[in-house]
Amino acid sequence: MASVLNVSAYLFTRIDDPAALRPVLRERAAGAGLRGTILLAEEGINLFLAGDADAVRGFVGGLRADFPALRAKESWSDAVPFGRLLVKVKREIIRMDRPDVRPQDGRAPAVSPATLRRWLDRGVDDDGREVVLVDTRNAFEVDYGTFSGARDWRIERFTQFPDAASAHRDELAGKTVVSFCTGGIRCEKAALYLRDQGLDAYQLDGGILGWFAAEGDAHWDGDCFVFDEREALDPALAARAGV
């Protein structure tokens, strides 16, 4: 049985001095024997860590003293899929290069996996409108798997998303748009941008990994790429065969 706990978590929230927080979190994570990456910025925190289950959960529990709204997604592996521990300060925890998009000041409306499942099963939302899923990930990630019928604009990096969304705005008008990504962080910004474009846009709460945990492989084709040595997870949140 897999014994290494992997956790991903993020929170858009104002951090006044991320540079001062960096050594504090590095010492805590290193002391717990964790490996992975923690990103800090004035807009929030984003992390991917792995290690002993008690150590990982203890670290995340300690973070919630400062970030009580932080929610973590868990998965398991046979080995730690990170080579070392990195704690970095960035301009953004997920780069979009649109400073006017500020989820730390208020997130876009979210759709739960259960609600989206109901909509997709019926073919329309609760008001009878067409539902359009927009994949906000890079093209190579989408190639591992995505929701059936999702829009894929073949972007190579997230900074290209706003221009792609603007180019496709008219085809989304009058529909219920749900943006999604691996863990939720990109679709937070994407949904806000889409709403700024006048669209009725929402984000999938918890992202793809949250969907897998709640709904399994329903309406999904393939696996989900992850940025660690596991490469991709199947809808059971296990490393795909051969990885």
Image: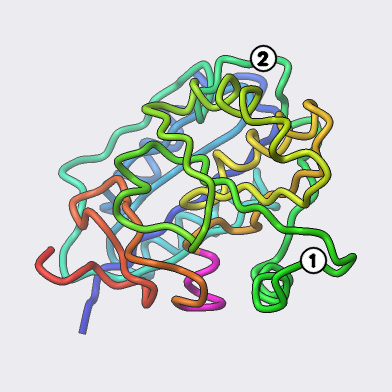
Q: Nearer the viewer, residue 181 or 81?
A: 181
- Residues shaded magenta: 210-216
Sequence-first disc among 1 and 2 = 2
Residue 204 picture quarter: bottom right
Which residue is denoted by mark 2 in the rendering? 99
Residue 24, position as x, y percentages in the image: 45, 33
| Residue drawn 54% across the image and 68% down it | 211
For residue 29, above or below residue 61: above
Q: Amino acid at mark 2?
A: Pro
Residue 232, position as x, y percentages in the image: 27, 58
Left or right of 108: which side holds 188?
Answer: left
Residue 231, position as x, y percentages in the image: 22, 53
| Residue drawn 36% across the image and 46% down it | 29
Q: Residue 125: which disc?
A: 1
Q: Are marks 1 and 2 in contact (CB under 8 Å)?
A: no
Dominant SS of magenta comes to helix
For residue 210, above or below residue 46: below
| Residue drawn 46% across the image and 20% down it | 90
- Alpha carbon distance from label 1 to label 2: 32 Å
Q: Amino acid at mark 1?
A: Asp
What SS does tag 1 mark? loop
